[in-house]
Amino acid sequence: MNRAAAFFRKVLLMLGFYLSLIDEPDDKEKFAEIFRSYGNMMFSKAMSVLHNTALAEEAVQESFLKIAKNISKISDPNCSKTAAFIVIIVRNTALDIWRKRKKEPVSVEEVEMDGL
């Protein structure tokens, strides 16, 4: 099983948590559709920025939280406007993580673990 698939098995367990942040049943359905449709793309985008599986996973999880909190702003989960909105969220979240990590010293163990 590849890393992305293993990650999304973990994230699937979090789906219930994300849905608990949303009050309206229609919004819950929208979020579930976004989760199914855009999850792999979100992970790929985060990896393209961060080049680190653990950090990309963190970026995707934070992005899902942001999407859940702003789900009422999304009218159609399957339109190009929504896709662009999601790309911007995950890209900006990944860049925020990258900037934060850039300021922190990196240990030898982290470098070695990233290569695994």
Image: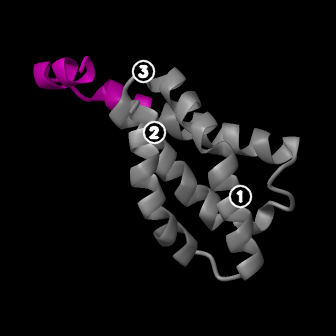
Amino acid tagged 3: His
> Do we see residue 58 in this rendering?
no
* Majority SS type along the magenta span: helix
Q: Secondary structure at mark 1?
A: helix
The answer to whether residue 35 is above or below residue 42 is: below
The quadrant holding residue 92 is top right
Q: Give me the C-alpha separation between circle 3 and circle 2.
A: 17 Å
The quadrant holding residue 40 is top right
* Marker disc for residue 12: none
In front: mark 3 or mark 2? Answer: 2
The answer to whether residue 29 is above or below residue 88 is: below
The residue identified by callout 1 is 33
Amino acid tagged 2: Ala
Image coords of residue 54 (percent x, y): 34, 36
Amino acid tagged 1: Glu
Toward the viewer: 92 or 81?
A: 81
Toward the viewer: 39 or 2?
A: 2
The residue identified by callout 3 is 51
Q: Secondary structure at mark 2?
A: helix
The answer to whether residue 81 is above or below residue 106 is: below
The residue identified by callout 2 is 5
The answer to whether residue 103 is above or below residue 38 is: above
